[in-house]
């Protein structure tokens, strides 16, 4: 496709040049003031302002997770998480991908409304990228927001070995001083005391509980410290890249102002004390200035239960927010934030029931959609240009994060109207034995799209299905 004619040596020489440019520092004071906070920003190899072109290689990596020990991982570009891809709404993103692993893989760009052929689902939208092979992904970025990328091949194991990264699509028309901005990629990893990676368990109870890693990571690090300037508002843009872990955020009883979720900003901000991120969800949070220099606050993951019969998770410290003396002017008062989101019109829309089901045995567990595991699923059908109401019924006593590829949906209330404030979601938690309704409009991107539980153990156990959008 586009740019595939660029010789590889040209990419490498550009990469080398890119290394000479200054990195973002912790004290940068430009209008956006985004700190790297442990993330490496992907180098844009294309000089044109509306194209972001990156070279990305999946590679075996050995990193220190347990102090003094080495953990064999697989990563994008050798970093955990993979490079932060930064672009702006409307840009074209080219990802020249090379598989340096010993096993096939693909890249799925979670949440981005891209053409079906770029969705990264093996044997459905593309052939898996074999060891040593390459694949060029190329698509435009129609929506601002925080997205992420990960394999869609042997996903539980490959993502669990370290293959995930964030994509920040900036909104050029956004007010400039919303806050000093940090992207937080929350994840976890399962390792033993020697640092060896522990494989996922197929024991039924473990599959149901999901693979919660025993080491929680923020931007690949354990309990890092983020310096925040006194008098400055903070903006935390957070993605949950864990396989199964839910994060219920707490900050010493303070409230966050949530201004965005999966598909960019909300219609209007809402105050929330404990935002919850199910796997693959994103939030965009503002924090008022935290206090005087010399003080600090702990951002923690609060105990949360994922099912009626599952125990509470333990509280985990995530980030120490350490207040340091101001180097920049105090934040100006927050402007009134609003975004025009057209409420989805579901009058006359076809209702499609998607029941999330489980078949528990003593020795094995099978999950499915409407009682059918993903391996035997028949697709749901929809027409380009049509609107459906997906009635997602959780028939199990465990929560499931429901993810639809390729399209945003709007959660509906009991009357069928979109919930206020309006938002664009691609992943939503479905509590135990609960039914939710989602309105989704199929714009002009035909093809076979997946939907599945984003607890990856559950997806692997069969909780996935297909949606065929046809002309
Ligand atoms: Cu699930």
Image (tube, helix red, strand yellow):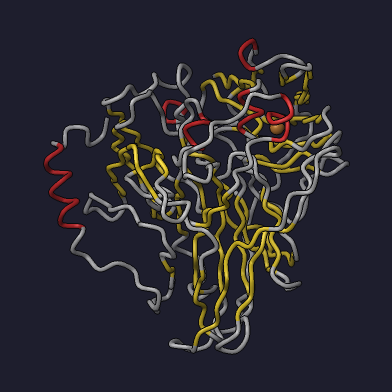
Q: Residue 2's x, y, as percent?
A: 26, 34
**Image quadrant where one finds the N terminus:** top left
Q: In the picture, residue 212 is in which quadrant? A: top right
**Image quadrant where one finds the C terminus:** top right
User: Is residue 444 placed above or below 217 in the rendered structure?
Assistant: above
Instruction: Determine the residue positioned at 41% across, 54% down.
Output: 68
Q: Residue 468's x, y, as percent?
A: 59, 19
Instruction: Determine the residue positioned at 73% across, 64% down.
Output: 270
Q: Residue 176's x, y, as percent?
A: 48, 73
Instruction: Determine the residue positioned at 77% across, 22% down.
Output: 358
Foreground pick, 349 / 188: 188
In-image side of 172 versus 379 (left or right): left
User: Is residue 149 placed above or below 293 in the rendered structure?
Assistant: above
Please state the total of marks drawn on the protein image: 0
In-image side of 451 versus 103 (left or right): right
Q: In the picture, residue 41 is in which quadrant? A: bottom left
User: Is residue 224 placed above or below 456 in the rendered structure?
Assistant: below
Q: Residue 25's x, y, as percent?
A: 35, 73
Foreground pick, 343 / 413: 413
Q: Quadrant of ligand 1?
A: top right
Foreground pick, 61 / 414: 61
In-image side of 240 versus 59 (left or right): right
Q: In the picture, residue 356 is in which quadrant? A: top right
Instruction: Determine the residue positioned at 40% across, 40% down.
Output: 72
């Amino acid at each position: 496709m586009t740019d595939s004619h660029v010789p590889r040596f040209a990419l490498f020489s550009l990469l080398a040049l890119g290394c000479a440019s200054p990195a973002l520092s912790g004290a940068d004071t430009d209008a956006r003031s985004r700190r790297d906070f442990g993330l490496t920003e992907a180098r844009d190899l294309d000089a044109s302002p509306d194209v972001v072109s990156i070279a990305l290689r999946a590679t075996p990596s050995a990193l220190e997770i347990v102090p003094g020990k080495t953990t064999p991982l697989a990563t994008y570009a050798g970093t955990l998480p993979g490079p932060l891809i930064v672009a702006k709404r409307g840009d074209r993103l080219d990802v020249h991908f090379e598989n340096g692993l010993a096993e096939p893989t693909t890249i799925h760009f979670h949440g981005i409304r891209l053409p079906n052929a770029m969705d990264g689902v093996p044997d459905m939208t593309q052939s898996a990228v074999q060891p040593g092979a390459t694949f060029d992904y190329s698509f435009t970025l129609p929506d601002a927001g925080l997205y992420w990328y990960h394999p869609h091949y042997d996903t539980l194991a490959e993502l669990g070995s370290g293959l995930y990264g964030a994509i920040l699509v900036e909104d050029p028309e956004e007010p400039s001083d919303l806050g000093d901005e940090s992207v937080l990629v929350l994840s976890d990893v399962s390792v033993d005391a020697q640092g060896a990676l522990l494989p996922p368990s197929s024991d039924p109870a473990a599959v149901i509980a999901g693979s919660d890693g025993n080491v929680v990571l923020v931007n690949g690090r354990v309990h890092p410290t983020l310096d925040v300037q006194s008098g400055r508002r903070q903006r935390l843009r957070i993605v949950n890249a864990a396989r199964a872990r839910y994060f219920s955020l707490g900050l010493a009883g303070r409230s966050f102002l949530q201004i965005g979720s999966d598909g960019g900003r909300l219609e209007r901000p809402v105050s929330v004390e404990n935002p919850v991120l199910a796997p693959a969800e994103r939030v965009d949070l503002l924090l008022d200035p935290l206090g005087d220099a010399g003080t600090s606050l702990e951002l923690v993951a609060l105990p949360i239960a994922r099912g009626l019969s599952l125990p509470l998770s333990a509280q985990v410290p995530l980030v120490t927010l350490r207040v340091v003396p101001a180097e920049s002017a105090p934040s100006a008062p927050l402007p009134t934030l609003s975004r025009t989101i057209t409420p989805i019109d579901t009058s006359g829309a076809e209702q499609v029931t998607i029941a999330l089901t489980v078949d528990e045995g003593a020795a094995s567990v099978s999950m499915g959609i409407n009682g059918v595991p993903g391996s035997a699923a028949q697709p749901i059908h929809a027409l380009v240009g049509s609107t459906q109401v997906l009635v997602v019924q959780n028939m199990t006593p465990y929560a499931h994060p429901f993810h639809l590829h390729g399209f945003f949906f709007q959660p509906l209330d009991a009357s069928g109207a979109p919930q206020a404030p309006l938002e664009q979601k691609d992943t939503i938690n479905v509590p135990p034995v609960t039914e939710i309704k989602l309105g989704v409009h199929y714009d002009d991107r035909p093809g076979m799209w997946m939907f599945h539980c984003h607890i990856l153990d559950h997806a692997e156990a069969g909780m996935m299905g297909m949606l065929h959008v046809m002309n």
